[in-house]
Amino acid sequence: MLALLTGYFGIWFGVMLVSTLLFALRKGAKPAPVAKPLPRVSILIAARNEEAAIGRCLSAVRALDYPAALVEVLLGDDGSTDQTRAHAEEAMQGYGGLFRCISITETLGAARGKANVLAHLARAATTDFFFITDADIAVPRTWLSGMLAYARPGIGTVTGLTVVRGPRLFDRLQGLDWLLSLSLVQVVTDLGKPVTAMGNNMLVTREAYEATGGYEALPFSVTEDFELFKAIVVRGFGFCNVFRPEVLALSLPIATPLGLLHQRRRWLRGVEALPWGLKLGLLVYGNFYLGVLALAWLAGPGPALAVLGAKCWLRGY
């Protein structure tokens, strides 16, 4: 068993080192000047019982370096039983752009959960660019212009970079995991392979969205962003992942290990649709902490901490 774990960690670190090298040598898409006059844009946010986070999210939206008159912010309140709506309206009081908080009470087609909220918001949007984020995300000031710089003709989705930030070691380990996984995604995307998109930092053009029939026409999935991404790619639209600071959004960390496992289990639902080679790579990547626990049980805490420290060093964390 110990030999198997040694082999596993050898493969894991080999994959990480190769991906780090490929990431350093990558030649991704280059930004282009945003068209003038600047286009109107819609920001779509699904929220349910997010009173603790929504103020932070909307404060970041208000701080965007984009003319507020060209921005409509649409918040979908999905049956919240707390003060989400009141906190949101307070945070957006006096906003120079359009802000609407829409109560979601009906189901559209096959859409459920967050997908249903976004289906309603997309119907309410009046622009050609849908910027999608979550209530626990704070986007950077340059988010809109940074994403639009990659929204050239033929591109259906642009995905930004999201990392987890928090004061605890548990939070920092989540942030490390996000950086490692997103760097892998970036390397594969730069090779022209459609891997995934993230619905907490995503630009979707109206043309691409409507070509799919919208969320109400898509099969239900707990990874609704990936379902939409697949449908857009199938219809011939291009995609772009942007690993740059101007689109770097900050996510609140998951509070508990049980919550983190629930999140990862949901992500794995999306992995089922990937090619077998990527499935295998993500399986190796995703079982790291189980391997560390097994190593601690078999060989003691010293070797396990050494492996964990090597992972942190690999990303300069």
Image (cartoon, rainbow, N blue to C red):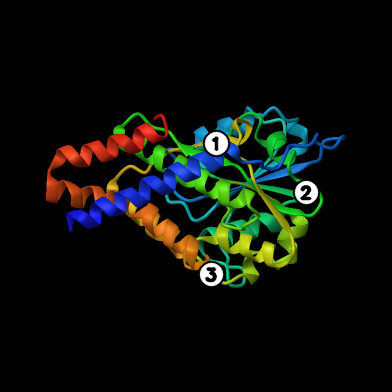
Q: Residue at x 13, y 46 (%)?
A: 299
The alpha-carbon separation of the residues under discs 1 and 3 comes to 27 Å
**Residue 258 image label:** none
Task: Write down the residue under mark 1.
Answer: 249
Disc 2: which residue: 127
Determine the image quadrant of residue 233: bottom right
Q: Secondary structure at mark 2?
A: loop
Which amino acid type is shown beneath numbered disc 2?
A: Thr
Q: Residue at x 43, y 49 (%)?
A: 15
Q: How far is mark 1 from mark 2, CA to CA? A: 22 Å
Q: Secondary structure at mark 1?
A: strand
Neighbourhood count class around disc 1 (C-alpha, 10 Å): few under 14, some 14–19, many 20 upward: many
Residue 66 visible in the picture:
yes
According to the picture, the residue beneath numbered tag 3 turns out to be 220
Q: Nearer the viewer, mark 3 or mark 2?
A: 3
Q: Residue at x 46, y 47 (%)?
A: 181
In three-dimensional space, the C-alpha distance between marks 3 and 2, rounded to whole angstroms, equals 25 Å
